[in-house]
Amino acid sequence: MEKINETAADGNSVETDNETEPMHFEFTPVSIESFFDAEEKGDADISPENIGLTVLSAHQEELVQKLRSKLKVVAPDRLERLDKRLKDLKTLAAAIANFPSLLQRTNLNTSVRTPAALVESIISYQEDGDTLLHMPSKAALGKGFLVTKIHTFFSMYKLANNFAEMEEKEARVYYDETVSMMFTLMAEDVYLNLMKDKTLSMDLRRQLANSLIILWEHRSDQTINDIAPVLQSVWNARRTLAPAFGTMMGTSELLLVSIQMDSQWNQFIKQRLGDQEVSQAMEEFLFGLSYEQILRLRAILRDQGVKAIGRDEVSSYLGERVKTDVSLDYRDFYLLYTVRRDNARVRQRLHLPGPTKTLEDFFIRFVMEQNEAKQKNDQASIATTKID
């Protein structure tokens, strides 16, 4: 997180009196490279149209209007409630917009905050524990806005499914949009975790810090939007892993066979699954158990000569309640993610064996490292072409 003794409350950063020329950023998609220029050119101002929360994307607006038109005909009473909820969402966004932008040079009560200084303070802050009170106000408020938006779209899914006379395939789009926003909520934790990893290059950590600031400003993230369908597919594929509860082995091979997804995920599996921590994080994800529970269960099965058990038997063997079902509910995904996240943080802090990052951490790091390498290759190719 940021060096947030300097960015607490309203996100105050280090003081500076330098006046510099403005820069302009595009948000969709965001050019991280242009944001890096803030370090060289100084503090940046962003054009007004790129400031503030994304209340509804163009796709989301289309979904809202489609559902409204259906409800207007078949369930006008439900339409009135939906319109009230959407109005409340926009009112909340408007209130948050009154707080200073994180993407502009801003005169606060006791200091001047700049995007470049905020990036550096985020990277330098390495304390453990809950950093809620160290966040800029806009970041904390925006998280609440995103949760409200998630609940709104989930209610729209239920309306589409139960009242708007939509086919399941049509209604499912609203659920998929809900899940995508859930991954955006998760992204904040992932970025914060990765920025504390000193094995990452400073350039990548700055890129993560920039992504976090943009996420705080807009509550939307292009990288997460791109990979959310992949992570959702992996989550869905957990249903095929029931036989693996016998030996607690072979999950990686089963996953490779059972999931036919995009090349990025397959590259991640092939290149990183050999890393012990990645493999351990994968097992936690797939089994729905902690690293410690997996070790205990393996030992119990081995000692008792048991070759196969069902998911519903895991709790009795471990002597404690564990959630190993394969619910496709996005709330269960987030709930189990936070358990894995908290366990990983404890291991990191106490120097315990087992994964110190979640599968999502490892995968998003892999994606961003690939993107960084591609940007560098593209820049090198452009430079070579100009020389030629």
Image (tube, rainbow, N blue to C red):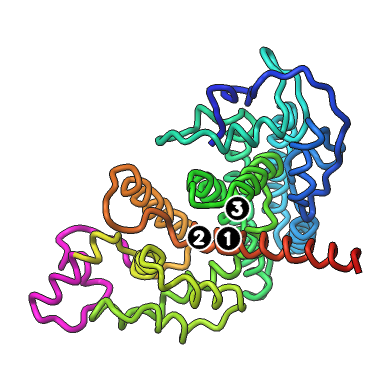
Q: Mark 2 and mark 1 in contact (Cβ < 8 Å)?
A: yes
Q: Amino acid at mark 3?
A: Thr
Q: Amino acid at mark 2?
A: Tyr
Give how far apart the Cα atoms at labels 1 and 2 are.
6 Å
- Give the extent of the magenta segment: 296-324
Q: Nearer the viewer, residue 98 or 156?
A: 98
From where the camera sits, is residue 175 visible?
Answer: no
The residue under the point 23% across, 80% down is 247
Residue 370 in picture, x, y percent from top left: 63, 65
Among the two numbered marks 3 and 1 on one chain, the one whose residue lies closer to the N terminus: 1
Quadrant position of residue 377: bottom right
Determine which residue is flagged by label 1. Answer: 179
Residue 331 in picture, x, y percent from top left: 47, 56
Among the two numbered marks 2 and 3 on one chain, the one whose residue lies closer to the N terminus: 3
Q: Is residue 281 above or below residue 141?
A: below
Q: Amino acid at mark 1?
A: Val
